[in-house]
Image: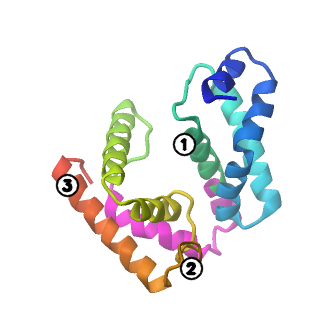
Amino acid sequence: MEDQEIIELFFQRSEQAIVELSYQYGSMMRRVSFGILQDFEDAEECVNDAYLGVWNNIPPERPNPLAAYLCRITKNLSLNRLRYQQAKKRNLSMERSLEELEEIEGSLPAAGTPEEAWSEKELTKAIEKFLMGLDQKSRILFVKRYWFLISEEDLADEMDMRRNAVAVKLFRIRKKLKEYLRKEGVTI
């Protein structure tokens, strides 16, 4: 079933929308959540909470692309759960991944006010444009590391690279992104 058909089911308030969403994107959502939480039960709870969030937000929203919208909700719920569970004991891989991005994101605010939401949309557009200019391997590394929060070690295994090569490549991509954002006039 196509994304727009699933969204229409939500607008009709049909429970079939959740069934179709689960069929199409459930495994992806569980992978995102498990990658952060490293616990199947907690990941499953976050995915179920994400389904509820989608149910409550569609309508009025019409997310496009739906997969990115689902990943974002799942990721945010999983990060919130992790922060709650491990306030003192941190997941070092995830923390390092987020720290790496802080050097780029700087003081960008979370979307709360309309101005902040606009700023976030502009940043998103700029990052998407930057990523489209990268070679496929670099784009995959960046997205897997900073969206799915996959550790450098796991990325090295998946991409058949040495861990050090992954770290260096990610460092160079972050540096290029920072330069690109400055050049585009995105405040960081």
- Measure the C-alpha gap from mark 2 to mark 1: 24 Å
Residue 15: mark in rendering = none
Which secondary structure, mark 1? helix
Residue 41, image x, y percentages:
83, 58
The crowd level at tag 3 (other Cα within 10 Å; few <14, some 14-19, many 20+) is few
- The amino acid on which the numbered mark 3 sits, given as a three-letter code, is Arg
Residue 153: mark in rendering = 2
| Precedes in sequence: disc 3 or disc 2 | 2
Task: Name the residue carrying label 3.
Answer: 182
24 relative to 107 in the view: left or right? right
Magenta residues, dominant SS class:
helix
The crowd level at tag 2 (other Cα within 10 Å; few <14, some 14-19, many 20+) is some
Q: Looking at the image, which is closer to me, 3 or 119?
A: 3
- The amino acid on which the numbered mark 1 sits, given as a three-letter code, is Ala
The residue lying at 24 percent from left, 47 percent from top is 186
The residue lying at 75 percent from left, 18 percent from top is 13
62 relative to 82 in the view: left or right? left
- Measure the C-alpha gap from mark 3 to mark 2: 30 Å
Task: Name the residue carrying label 1.
Answer: 68
Asked if residue 104 lies in the magenta stretch, the reply is yes
Task: Tell me the magenta residue range.
Answer: 79-107
Residue 34, image x, y percentages:
71, 61
Residue 147, image x, y percentages:
52, 57
| Precedes in sequence: disc 1 or disc 3 | 1
Residue 164, image x, y percentages:
44, 85
- Placement of the N terminus among the 4 image quadrants: top right
Q: Looking at the image, which is closer to me, 167 or 5?
A: 5
